[in-house]
Amino acid sequence: MKNLFKSRRFKILTGTLALLIAGALICAANGNSETAQSSIVGIIFTPANWAATKISNGISYVFGEASGNADYLKRIDELEKQVGSLQSRLSDYENLHKQNALYKDALGLKEDNPDFTFVEASAISRDAADIFGSYTINKGTINGVQTGNAVLYGNYIVGIISNAYPNYSVVKTILDPDFSVSAYEIVSGEISYVTGDAALAADGMCKMANLNTDSAVTYGSIISTAGISGTIPKGLIIGTVEEVDEEIISVSNYAVVKPGIDVNNISNCLVLINGGSAE
């Protein structure tokens, strides 16, 4: 019996009873209707219960957010696919629109010159360092393309084929100083020639050179190919005059001509494979 009172279990039991009795006395003194046991258990376990509740709420929140995010990401993925589809359709539309414009403008030229034969080509590369805008197309001698063929965009002159290879060719544009074509002002009929100019090419311009000081060519004049030699057909639009100025090294004027088509941003073109070669 003496050993029982000294045992660890007896001490724990005695301590627990003491806590229960103390809780009962406190509740009685305060008039609290709760039992001593529930009060003490509440005191002991409330912090643990609070922590467990927070953890449980946190887990629910995390899983709820994960589910919400999954739905959200799924929706984003669906919208991105829709945007991609619309962009693809828009690209197809733009290409079709450009192709229609290319052929629509060339149709009138074809009606006036029924013997003309065209080959449609696409630009496949450009030299970014070339200020004259030369580019490579995906058609060559196996398609009937030859060096010197006129290159058009609808009824606008773009340039000529400077080099033709079996399955590709290089286009020299009207901005290049090595390019030259007879030209005339469509109202007055005044004839001269249009060529590229290094100083003007940076701004995407070329010039109608060797004009008389009393020339009728002025701002807004439309310049077209004259077709004098018959190698580049008459009536292709070159562009419009932006200004007229005096030549420095000769007693003549020149007109700054803005091409009717931006040769630096052409993606498709027509090569005139018969009836048109370099002048």
Image: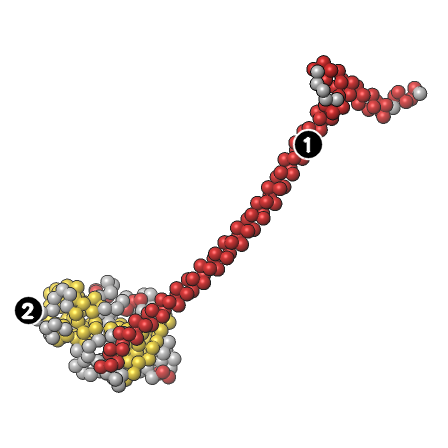
- Could you say where residue 174 lies in the image, as x and y percent from the top left? 24, 72
Which residue in the structure is indicated by mark 2? 214
Amino acid marked by disc 2? Asp
Q: Is residue 37 above or below residue 203?
A: above
Amino acid marked by disc 1? Asn
Q: Secondary structure at mark 2?
A: loop
Q: Quadrant of residue 108?
A: bottom left
**Whether residue 160 can be seen here:** no
Among numbered discs 2 and 1, the one appearing first in the sequence? 1
In the rendered image, the residue lying farthest to the right is 1
Mark 1 crowdedness (10 Å alpha carbons): few <14, some 14-19, many ≥20: few
Q: Quadrant of residue 197?
A: bottom left
- Could you say where residue 241 lies in the image, as x and y percent from the top left? 16, 66
Q: How many marks?
A: 2
Q: Quadrant of the C terminus?
A: bottom left
Mark 2 crowdedness (10 Å alpha carbons): few <14, some 14-19, many ≥20: few
In the rendered image, the residue lying farthest to the left is 214
Q: Secondary structure at mark 1?
A: helix
In the rendered image, the residue lying farthest to the bottom is 115
Which residue in the structure is indicated by mark 1? 49
- Could you say where residue 56 lies in the image, as x and y percent from the top left? 65, 38
